[in-house]
Image: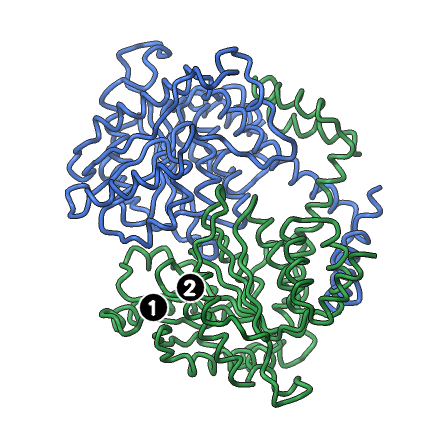
Chain colours: A blue, B green
Amino acid sequence: MLETKLAASVLEGNRLALARLLTQIENGSAQGREALNELFPHTGRAHLIGVTGAPGTGKSSLVNQLARHFRQKNKAHPEQSDSPEEAPRVAILAVDPSSPFTGGAILGDRVRMRDLSGDSGVFIRSMASRGSLGGLAAATSAMVQVLDAAGYEIILIETVGAGQAEVDIARLAHTTLVVEAPGLGDDIQAIKAGILEIADILVINKADRPGAELTERALKSMLQLAHPTQHEFHHHGLFESRETRAPDNPEEQNPGTAPIWIPPIHRTVATEGRGIEELVEAILRHAQHLRETGEWRRREAARMQAELDQLLRETLVRRWRSQITEEQYHQVLKELVERRVTPWQAVTALTEGER
Amino acid sequence: MLETKLAASVLEGNRLALARLLTQIENGSAQGREALNELFPHTGRAHLIGVTGAPGTGKSSLVNQLARHFRQKNKAHPEQSDSPEEAPRVAILAVDPSSPFTGGAILGDRVRMRDLSGDSGVFIRSMASRGSLGGLAAATSAMVQVLDAAGYEIILIETVGAGQAEVDIARLAHTTLVVEAPGLGDDIQAIKAGILEIADILVINKADRPGAELTERALKSMLQLAHPTQHEFHHHGLFESRETRAPDNPEEQNPGTAPIWIPPIHRTVATEGRGIEELVEAILRHAQHLRETGEWRRREAARMQAELDQLLRETLVRRWRSQITEEQYHQVLKELVERRVTPWQAVTALTEGER
């Protein structure tokens, strides 16, 4: 009953209830899950915008500026809004997967709070990495769903770094911004080759610094390698995705006729607010492109499939655990460590009771 | 029978058979798994050395130099070697998790081949990231086992980057080297906070460049944050590890009496071979420390538990898949995408037949 109250309070716009529920979800509590079940039918309205890039690119300032611009201008979903005069509500979820052990957040929370506090239409939350990456992506997904149900139409998901974690979290977003800055060196560019492939929009922040021209040229040549055709959404799921295979809309069945999205490169100086206006326009153009081509729906479906698969994996493990004693597990592990059984023999011994 | 022959050939030291088996394992073939089962009892002799760090730190040159030094001097396991005059055989496994989509390798394979080719006691293999990270760590683990069984006493595992992938792969190693270089900027240092915690030895390569002093000072202050006490091996497993909880050796039960390993910082110029001698000494000292404190056995056990858990997860998913049709799965997914069921209801619908 308590969780029903919590979910109801979140739907009513109670910020304290929202903060409390997000904490429950971050901690993986059963109450959080119950509340999420109730909120789920209210999700699906938000535009999820991922912002990723190496430390030092000024992502946090950029995210702040984006939030302010979305608040100042009602450009998010004018066609969906009940009152066209009202600015969209904006949530910022900052995820830091860089420290798996300490869980320490290095994101500019204080700067952020100073810039945006006092605006009741903005909700800010940061989250440090705990446990496995699968867990982090799943927790992020759940937190995004809560913010979505709570009526935040723009959700900015900020991650730091350039690895698999960012790819996993970028899967959540409709629009992914990859942020660069001049002068971070060619070495950083090299590691970004992978993450460039998930970029819908490229941002060169701190563009008043020397080397912006060089950075843009490097990005352009890398883009040509990374985007020979339109970005395809890959999901290594439990089953092949049909949603991406056979779209309902006949126009989508022939992607050659649909317009192709070429990731634009935008220069900004977030600390001075320069280039933000144009960047917001590009984000809105991308949302429109996604809707017109059916890609919005495809990305939603792929995201849900990824989440379903993750939950299925967790459930299967939990059921298996309930059928085996810790004693049995450690006996087999001991034999494995002593090399009296092979890993595959150990797995057979521990799962044969399941048949 | 064929796979038995392959395993036997690998044990006999056939390099072609070894290369072929590693390919089978990388591709996840059933034959590879069979051969691995046969080789597993022959594993457990190698000293696994992880070498990780950002691109541009000169890891590949460093790994080459380490391989050469191990080959020139028989310092690996003099007490275990049948013929004390013989140098240990050295394998290099270079893993690149930076590009999950293209699988392109950016490691210095050609440089490496030029330096070390012609030495039949050295085996070199590189591996690009395919599919999920769990898969990459599992495949790396399996390849290391094959190299171990094939008689390579020193296995250098090189990874590029600074994220969860490196942490997962570092779990495989007895000794983990984290490589830095001067002048890569404070931003890179920040992202390394997490990976520093897995370092047994820190290397400042390219130490003839300006800023080496500054880098060393930064590393020292970060080390004090990261290593308030001895490094503990964390494993988020299916069951809590007992191996790390209750050691057999009474001395280990009181870790206060065992010597604590403080990660030393070494300066090298790999391209000129400077500092390599001292670094090899530090690696051997660390191996000795691991053996004397029982930590060697604990790391082995934790590694095997991680691998067992991964195989268990895969097996549970495979069994579940055999009990459900693709039709059923996609029907439930469709209802989820249309928000007619919640994720948890979808999971229940797809797993209730398993009860």
Q: Residue B196 bears which disc, if any?
A: 2
Q: Residue A30: name its quadrant.
A: top right
Q: Residue A99: name its quadrant.
A: bottom left
- Give the camera-side residue of B36 and A238: B36
Instruction: Give the image location of residue A1, x and y in percent.
Output: 59, 26
Residue at the spot 29% in from the left edge and 38% down from the top edge: A220
Whichever of labels 1 and 2 marks the residue nearer the N terminus, that label is 2
Dot 1: element: helix
Q: Is residue B92 above or below residue A33?
A: below
Instruction: Give the image location of residue B82, x and y in percent.
Output: 69, 86
Q: Amino acid at mark 1?
A: Leu
The reply to whether label 1 and label 2 mark residues of one chain is: yes
Q: Is residue B291 above or below residue A12?
A: below
Instruction: Give the image location of residue A352, x and y in percent.
Output: 83, 48
> Given contact means CB atoms under 8 Å apart, are the residues at marks 1 and 2 in contact?
yes
Instruction: Give the image location of residue B32, x and y in percent.
Output: 72, 54
Q: Which quadrant: the C terminus of chain A?
A: top right
- Give the camera-side residue of B24 and A249: B24
Give the crowd class for mark 2: few <14, some 14-19, many >=20 residues within 10 Å.
many
Q: Which residue is mark 1?
A: B219
